[in-house]
Amino acid sequence: MALPANLNLSQFSNKLRVTGFTLHCPTPKAISRTGGGEVLQARLGPSLWQGECQLSFSPQVKTAGIRALIDLLLDPGQTFNFSPVDYYGPAADLGGVALGSASVTLSAVASNNRDLTLAGLPSGYVLSPDDLLSFTHSGGIPALHRLVVGATANGSGVATVEVWPRVRPGWAAGAAVQLKTPFLRAIMLEREPGSSARIMHSGISFNFLQSLR
C-alpha cells in the first residue's frame, strides 16, 4: 500500500540515525536606508523553521530504506513530520518525568500572537526559555514554537509564556500541546546522497523547510 502524502514521526523521522543537526526560524525581511540614514525594515513573509540533518556512517542494508524515503520526500506534495532530534523535553524536566501523563492544552492566545496560556500543567511545573512546544491548528497542521519567556504553573496548572514564531490564525482553544516531543511538518528541499564503500554508506544529508499545508 502506498505511503501517505505526509509521513508521521514513526514512518520517517524516528528511523533516522542523526550525527549532525541544525534548526532555526529566521524572519524573511527587506532592509533599506533613507537618505538621512534611517534604517527601514519590512517583513516579507512568515517565519518558517528550517534546518539540516546529517546521517551516520552505516551499513548499506540499514541506509537503503532511508534513502528510498528521502527520494520519495523530494517529490512535490510530499511532507513529513519532524521532531528536533536534540530535544529531550523541557529544560527543567528532561524526559518529561514530572509532566507524566498530564494533558496540557492551549487555553488562550493574546492579541500580540506571542503570549499564550497553557492549562493542564502539574502545579509548580517550570517552563524555561528555549523550551519547545507544538500544537495542531484547525487545518491539522502542527505548529512548533520556542519559548522566549518561561513561566511556572500556578496551583490550577495554568501558565502564560511568550513564544516565537508568532502564533498563526487557525489555533483553537483546547488543542493538545506537545511538550515532550514537539514536532513540525516539513518539506524536503534537497539532499546529498552520500557514497558507498563496500558494505558501508556515508555522507547522506538533507535540508528541510517548514510546511504550512
Image: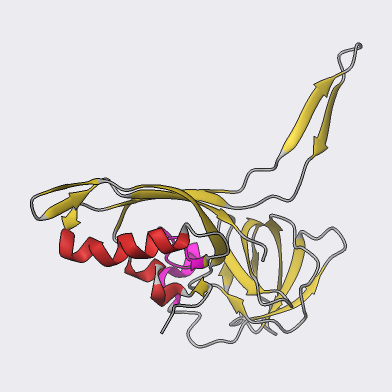
Judge by depth and name the residue closer to the eye, 209 or 87: 209
Judge by depth and name the residue closer to the eye, 96 or 152: 96
**Residue that appears at 86% across and 14% down:** 37
Q: Is 70 on the left-hand or right-hand side of 159? A: left
Q: Is 117 on the left-hand or right-hand side of 79? A: right
Is residue 93 in view from this perspective? yes
Is 182 drawn above or below residue 128 in the view shown? below
Q: Position of residue 46 (x, y in %)?
A: 73, 51
Is 5 drawn above or below residue 102 in the view shown? above
Q: Quadrant of residue 32?
A: top right
**Residue that appears at 29% across and 60% down:** 17
Q: Which residues are magenta?
A: 80-96
* The N terminus sits in image quarter: bottom left
Q: Position of residue 194 (x, y in %)?
A: 27, 46
Examine the structure image and report whether residue 116 is included in the region drawn in magenta: no
**Residue that appears at 79% across and 74% down:** 108
